[in-house]
Amino acid sequence: MGKSRKSLALAMAGVCVSIDLMMCFPIQADEFTKKDLDRWQKEFMTVVAEGEKLFHSSSLGKNKVSCDQCHPNGANTHPETYPKFQKQIGKVISLFEMVNWCLRNPLEGDPLAADDPKMIALLAYITYERRGVPLAPGKH
Amino acid sequence: MELNRRAFLKTTGAALMATALPMSLVRVAFGSQSPSQNFTFGYISDAHIQLIKGTKFVRNWDMGLIRSVQEANLLTPRPDFFMFGGDLAQLGMKEELDHGLEIMSKLRGKVHYVIGEHDYYLDLGAYWQSKIGPLWYSFDHKGVHFVVLNSILTYDRWTYKKWESPMDRMLAMARLDNPEGSPFMVGEQQLGWLRKDLAKVNKGTPVVVFSHSPIQKIYQGWNFWTEDAEKVQALLKPFKKVTVIYGHVHQIQYNQIGNISFQAVMATAWPWPYPQSYTQVTSRLPKLTVPMNRADPFFERDATGWQFIDVRKGNVDMHYQLPDNKNRSVVFNTKTGYPQDAKYQAADSRIPPQAHF
């Protein structure tokens, strides 16, 4: 009996400490600091930079052709219009599918999985170069 | 003798090919006193022959040049000569230049060459000069003075900085959107030559200048730009009829600055977006230009092509015929004094695919 009373007392003490901490440091949902923002932006820009490198790389495909040869600064890729009905494919597709079309055809290479870090990086770069343009899904 | 696509097709009896030929017909009409001075020439540009390795080259770019040469060979009557507008190679390699010249050797007729940055920045034009000829020169033909410029030079501090290798310099200039790039220019030495060359020419003589870069300032970020464009324009100002024809931009552009008409030519390799489609910067599309339809990437040759030039009475009429893209005619309007699109110039005549975004 003495044992269980002791643990109850300990448990109650624990609850009190928790309440005390919450009173001193009120934690709200998804709170973050300037430092966090800087870090996340840096993480994002690292991937954009990786995408920029891949976009200008002669080894992404198999014939030395790089994406930027036709799309300087990612221009004429229209990321804001996807998903859209891609008339040449005959269905609604996402931008990664057009990237893969380019990898297979003008670059004569192999497609990437949608979640391949290289694909994420390419999409990050393409979209970053188009920042500020309003979303226009479906626009041709 | 008036050459147009219909007459050409009739002459060759190739009516069936009417929809297949991606020909661009350019009429340069000059103030010649006699009709015998009328003549035509063809213009092929921006082939970007690209070595993969060994004897393998990028098929797509090969096919563009091969097709243009084959079509140009069908022209009847024959044009007086051809121009090649620069960027025969992608990375200035001997293999690429040799392969490009081999394809060009099938072209029947005399060819004058303009050098592009992709031909130049590996060895600064050494192989080009040994195989093709000088980088700038002039010639006269049937009462017209033609000038070929090397407009893709740049600041010495960039060209001669400590590169790890000549190929590093080539790659840096070959990347169109390179923030570490350097603006094109004609340079003082060549300007001095041009001044002397033009001094010998009667001011009433029509002058046609061929350059790789636009001798006007459109967007520096992609070198749709010549740093000393105004200096070249000033030297051309005393002449009554002047036309500048340039490559590099891989798209339809035309403009009029004072007495100078500007016309761009298509690439045989691939088309480029109009600079305003890169929204992070400001650019200036030549004021008269009605953009061509956006290219369909699923059709390799779309928005590529070559040009056919008809010299008659003082100015340039250019008829672009583009596979799987709307045919275009840019005609010099003698009343307004500038080139205009025959069909789409009026804002309410344009079609949705010409609206780029």
Image (cartoon, coloured by chain):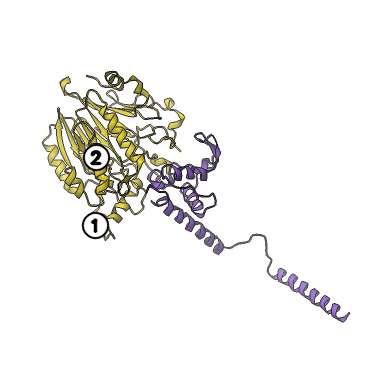
Chain colours: A purple, B yellow
Q: Taking A23 as reference, is B41 above or below it?
A: above
The chain under label 2 reads B
Q: Are marks 2 and 1 on the same chain?
A: yes
For mark 1, what is the residue?
Answer: B160
Residue B213 occupies quadrant = top left
Q: Is residue B137 left or right of residue B53?
A: left
Residue B234 percent location from the top left of the image: 21, 39
Where is B202 relative to B171, above or below? above
* Residue sitting nearer the eye, B61 or B270: B61
Q: Is residue B293 visible?
A: yes
- Determine the secondary structure under disc 1: loop
Q: Residue placed at 16% from the left, 48% from the top?
A: B189
Determine the residue positioned at 32% across, 52% down: B171
The residue furthest right is: A1
- Point out the tag, 2 or 1, that comes first from the N-terminus: 2
Q: Nearer the viewer, mark 2 or mark 1?
A: 2
* Residue B69 location, quadrant: top left
Q: Going by the image, does B123 lie left or right of B177?
A: left
- Mark 2 lies on residue: B102
- Dot 2, crowdedness within 10 Å: few (<14), some or many (≥20)? few
Circles 2 and 1 in contact, beta carbons < 8 Å:
no
Q: Is residue B132 left or right of residue B163?
A: left
